[in-house]
Amino acid sequence: MSLALVVSTTSGVARTGGRRTTSTARVSMLVRCQLLLYDSISSFSMRCGLRLRGWPWPTPQGEWNMEKGVIYAATGHKYVLEAQVSVRSLKKWCPNMSALLSTDHGSCSIQEAHSFNGVRWVVRGSPKLTNISAMIHSPYECTLFLDTDTYICDDINGMFQWLEWYDILFPFSVRRRTRYNPGNMPDWFTERSSGAVLYRKTPEVIELFRRWGRLYKKYHEADGCDSDQVPLRVALFNNKTLRVGTIAPEYHCYVLCPTTLAGRVHIIHGRGDMEAFASQVNAHEGIRTYLPGHGIINRERFDGAMKLLQRRDS
């Protein structure tokens, strides 16, 4: 259970220009109690196979689509700023997509919150557990969770159609930590990345998230492991019911490690000049490899490099 305050970014929580201004520190205790009660009812309803609707995340347009949306979680002001960049890129390609932020009061100002359609204010805690909590409390039937250091460079509406075949999808992790293996996982069952998680909100998926959170706490307390991918691997391996799919690199291009691509990249994950990354990875759309610091290597460039090496050796 988590104590959270959910507000619309246009609901009048803060007003400027000579009108009444309300600080986040003055949010009424009655609202907090109502939200705490909702969290309790929501947890109980999911365990019973029920689904609550109407959780107040209104958008500037009023009533909105509960079927799909994107959520972010940010603990720390610099991550809120990252999420702002990401959500702006999302709105460029998907202007009608709703995007929500889960964050603590100290990390995000009311002005910064206006970049999102709604904000869920939470008590500050572990960033990894904040991410998992945001996934659990998504108001959407179909949700795409994104890390704050992501950048959208093409339309991603089509991703939600994948949930007709799968319950939840993750990318494979390109930075797998195979040395720490508390669950004795087989080598062939590799770690998934938690930087992009696409899922349908069902009781089984929520239970997976809860188990993931419990395992993270267990490994963190026992061995100091701060990776959320290790407990996710164990939770997924022990899953017997969910249909788990894979998000291709073109929809989660991690630009801090070499990545092989085929087709247009839709989502970039990493830190740096994201627009420059987007231009590089989509300069060609055939089979190619992205090397950090070197850019794209496609067949033409590879053949040219081989000819130069042959001339040097001859």
Image (cartoon, rainbow, N blue to C red):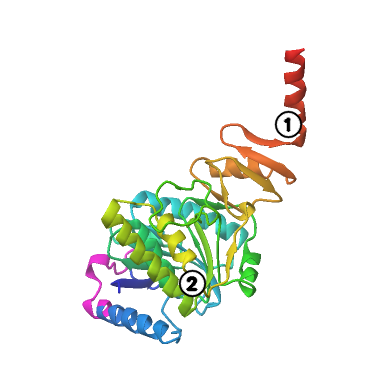
Please tell me whether residue 268 is drawn above or below residue 40 in the rendered image. above
Instruction: Please say whether residue 31 is one of the residues in the magenta stretch.
Output: yes
Quadrant housing residue 67: bottom right
Instruction: Indicate the position of residue 276 as horizontal and vertical percent values.
Output: 59, 40
Q: Which residue is pictured at 24% across the width and 81% down the height?
A: 30
Query: What's drawn in magenta, residue-wise?
Result: 16-32
- Mark number displayed over residue 60: 2
Residue 250 or residue 221, whichever sits in front = 221
Element type at mark 2: loop
Residue 60 or residue 199, whichever sits in front = 199
Q: Which residue is pictured at 39% across the width and 49% down the height?
A: 180
Dot 2 amino acid type: Pro
Quadrant housing residue 215: bottom left
Instruction: Indicate the position of residue 126 as horizontal and vertical percent values.
Output: 31, 58
Separation (CA) of disc 1 from disc 2:
50 Å
Most extreme residue toward the top is 314
Residue 191 or residue 252, whichever sits in front = 191
Can residue 54 be seen in the rendering of this structure? yes
Instruction: Indicate the position of residue 117 as horizontal and vertical percent values.
Output: 47, 68
Can residue 23 be seen in the rendering of this structure? no
Instruction: Indicate the position of residue 40 as horizontal and vertical percent values.
Output: 31, 81
- Location of mark 1 (residue): 302
